[in-house]
């Protein structure tokens, strides 16, 4: 449950080398931690990835900064073409992270025939069903509940109150935030004309290695086959993933997205916040869907789309910018119609007049 | 927490008869379970409800299939006009379901004067307040918390971490998935011009028989009267139902829908994913609202509507398809205005010219 | 966990005076509680704030009503220009509220060096990490989990299953509903071109006094600095607030809103249901954003906006009302183009004809 600094101190030159950045300035500066640009002080390194925050650089108290090449800096800098990534690595190095394990709480409740790995951190008030397998170096925070036959991979971290239902398989180094639910029943009901008849949801959920799942996100189990999240995919808070959805690798699913049943999402896809995707669709690799969009048809690989229904993003931007003009368009159109009507009447009048001649 | 097969074996002819389907082929085929079409093997029955998956039928290893009449099948089939429903019934028959009860965990914490029914399955780490009543054959999974005076009907299943607040009444055979919250305070604040003053939320929640509620869904208690969910209504994950909402029977509320306070939703209504409904409205029986739509006015019974604000669904489909053309419409309109302007100028020029003659 | 009436009885004149309302009718009427207009009976007071419900007034069995001035009432009334607020105060007076404390459950699990205040109500199955500080008169419902170093202010109420992660600071009189998560990791990943690299989320969350947070809402911790919710702000259910967001005082964030990282929201702002706000933006004081809108640019103070992207609300209302006419606009435009084409062709024909003369 705790995040702390290691107490270790680094030279700026060491950090630059560790993150494959270029040192710009005094490499002997001592760094013991990271901090935001407006609050950083002695011994702290900060970063600027968003140009919006460049202005704050001249006033920062930071000892050093991670910065893209070519931007003037009043303080020693580590130059990187990807300052955000370099900073991420520095933060990871200097924050240390939980190398220690706290063992298994004496109050652990477990069912029959569970297999627990080594060097675990199992906090109080964790409940395991029967035949659960927990890999080495797993962290289970208070209130975690794991169903019968579920498998948790090595180095996984399940935060407080996560529920993993029976038979769910979770890969190595997966992080699941508080209150997320993995393996709840899919929403499947057959109408008989009068009422709805529940379809038993007998499939599972398979979460690949290095996946991160946000707080209070829900991932339903498959009806028959599995719901699958590919390795390296990152899922934000309050996302809904329905039964039998398959997501590829290294995709990004932003907060409050909903993906309906049996849809297949490719690898390196980005679904921005509050996107909705209908069921039984295919979204190709490297697709990006703009925030709040609604996907109702297959999307070919590599597309960037937005809108409801989605269209190419650039086209959507123009259409959305025209939306406010709709009342003016209607008014102008009516005026034109009136003018043309008069022109036509006149012309007819002229013709009739001619005819009378 | 566990879903398992019964181990029982059925003849295809028995299953056909049990679900009122027509046997097509060898009725003596033995079936012991269900499986998805691409993974089914010997002894397993599969189904095709969505024509999209018909192609897989020729390659399936399934022993039999549930199928609509008239579609050629290479394997023995149960024919049904509603293959999804027939399959649901077969899956329910063959998966067995938890006929057994596991009793009441010794670590149950309960307040004063609770009444517990017979044949319960109460898992570890369940907490009951005072005067709680639990019907026969109820399942309470680990971490369930039930407030003072709440009532849980017979055969209800509350999955891990569900919170039922005080005074909530839950019907028979209700299923509530992990992390759902029933009876949290409604969002009611009176502004005094400067700050907000909390309105005590003193009503309750009444959940009818055979309702299913998805994971991490929230249903607020009424301000004074009750929030009411009618019998047979099915609610998906991450849905928000505000104070004093009333929903009729056998309605379908898909994931991430939000219904604002005091709105009345009829029976047999479908609200598709991510729909938002404003407060104090009436949505008639048998209404369908398309995904991501926003309902801001009453909707008469039987309508199918979409959009923000909603309009008839067919009209919305056409308007949405025209949206991408908005920039072209503006451009064409400007051109027409220019052409007409020239025509008018010319005409005036002509008139003036005539006048000079 | 319990809401009950005090059993105390008030005279109508006393209540009128307590809420600074004007007595209209018999001030000696006895009132012991509040009730909805259609169910209120002897000894109960009701209210009408929404004109929609005025019709029910003539049939109510209530002993008295809270009402705006000038509206005829068949029963004794308390007149107030803000009947909703007056009613809120009366409900608060007559429902009493939990003045008593129940003490600390014997099964509390706490880490090292926690500091607990006086007159606590700590229910069973609560878990505290190390160095947690709990203020006086705090209520922690069953299943609450609080991380290392977190601080809970006086008179705060945390409902069942709330997770407060380490280092989070929560103000006085804060109410947090069931399943809400405060301090989960922000969604920060740096792409290295192939996969995503987690940015350690080392900041905190600061919740001001008198904030209310809805069920299953998620508020992420900052990457370096803090995520901040200002005093008096009210947040509904299933809201997502990303890392480093700052919200001012007395703002209203309705259900299912999502606010992306580092955005600054002012004071007295209202974000209606399902609104999405992009990252790194500034929304000024006293802004109102209409339901389901998407904010993609800064919004100046005092604006009322709607749409995706947002435009002034009145303009959006007109544009949205025109949306259904898009197909007709396209059709009319094509007809006009055809007519003009004919006119132009005719004119050219005429010119050519003239030329031949």
Image (cartoon, coloured by chain):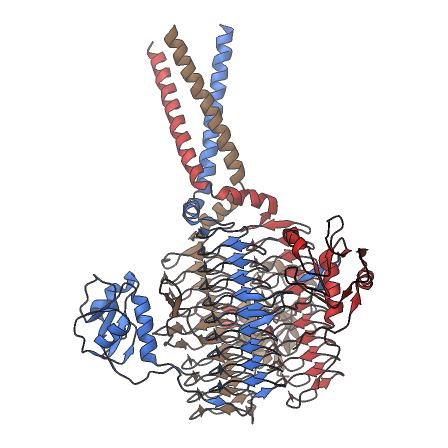
Chain colours: A red, B brown, C blue
Q: Is A192 situated above or below B332?
A: below
Q: Which image quarter: residue A249?
A: bottom right
- Above or below for B71 versus B41: above
Nearer to the camera, A108 or B317: A108
Is any part of residue B40 visible from this angle?
Answer: no
Q: Position of residue C252 (x, y in %)?
A: 45, 63
In the image, A194 versus C14, the foreground residue is C14
Residue C321, horizontal then vertical, whole percent = 41, 47
Q: Is residue C33 above or below residue C238?
A: below
**Residue drawn at x 26%, y 66% as measured from the top left:** C80
Q: Quadrant of the N terminus of chain B?
A: bottom right
B165 or C245, which lies in front?
C245
Return the x and y of residue C221 as percentages of the image width and height.
Answer: 60, 68
Please count the marks in the image. Answer: 0
**Image quadrant in which the C terminus of chain B is located:** top left
Which quadrant holds residue B112?
bottom left
| Residue C88 in the image, given as x and y percentages of width and height | 33, 71
């Amino acid at each position: 449950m705790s995040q702390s600094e290691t107490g270790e101190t680094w030279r700026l030159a060491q950090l630059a080398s560790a993150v494959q950045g270029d040192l710009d300035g005094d490499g002997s500066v001592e760094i013991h931690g990271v901090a935001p640009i407006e609050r950083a002080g002695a011994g702290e390194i900060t970063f600027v990835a968003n140009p919006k925050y460049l202005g704050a650089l001249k006033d920062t108290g930071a000892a050093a900064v991670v910065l893209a090449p070519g931007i003037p800096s009043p303080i020693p800098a580590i130059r990187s073409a990807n300052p955000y990534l370099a900073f991420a690595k520095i933060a990871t190095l200097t924050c240390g992270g939980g190398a220690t394990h706290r063992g298994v709480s004496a109050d652990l409740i477990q069912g029959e025939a569970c297999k627990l790995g080594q060097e675990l951190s199992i906090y109080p008030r964790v409940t395991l069903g029967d035949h659960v397998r927990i890999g080495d170096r797993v962290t289970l925070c208070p209130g975690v509940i794991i169903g019968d036959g579920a498998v948790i991979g090595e180095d996984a971290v399940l935060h407080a109150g996560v529920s993993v239902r029976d038979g769910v398989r979770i890969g190595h180094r997966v992080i699941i935030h508080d209150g997320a639910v993995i393996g709840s029943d899919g929403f499947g009901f057959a109408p008989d004309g009068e009422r709805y008849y529940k379809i038993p949801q007998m499939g599972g959920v398979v979460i690949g290695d290095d996946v991160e799942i946000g707080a209070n996100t829900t991932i339903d189990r498959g009806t028959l086959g599995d719901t699958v999240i590919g390795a390296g995919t990152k899922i934000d808070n309050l996302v809904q993933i329905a039964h039998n959805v398959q997501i590829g690798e290294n995709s990004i699913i932003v907060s409050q997205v909903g993906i309906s049943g049996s849809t297949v999402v490719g690898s390196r896809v980005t679904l921005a916040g509050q996107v909705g995707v209908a069921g039984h669709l295919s979204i190709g690799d490297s697709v990006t869907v703009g925030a709040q969009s609604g996907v109702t048809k297959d999307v070919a690989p590599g597309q960037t789309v937005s809108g409801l229904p989605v269209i190419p993003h650039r086209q959507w931007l123009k259409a959305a910018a025209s939306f406010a003009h709709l009342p003016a368009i209607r008014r102008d159109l009516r005026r034109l119609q009136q003018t043309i009507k008069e022109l036509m009447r006149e012309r007819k009048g002229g013709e009739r007049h001619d005819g009378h001649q």
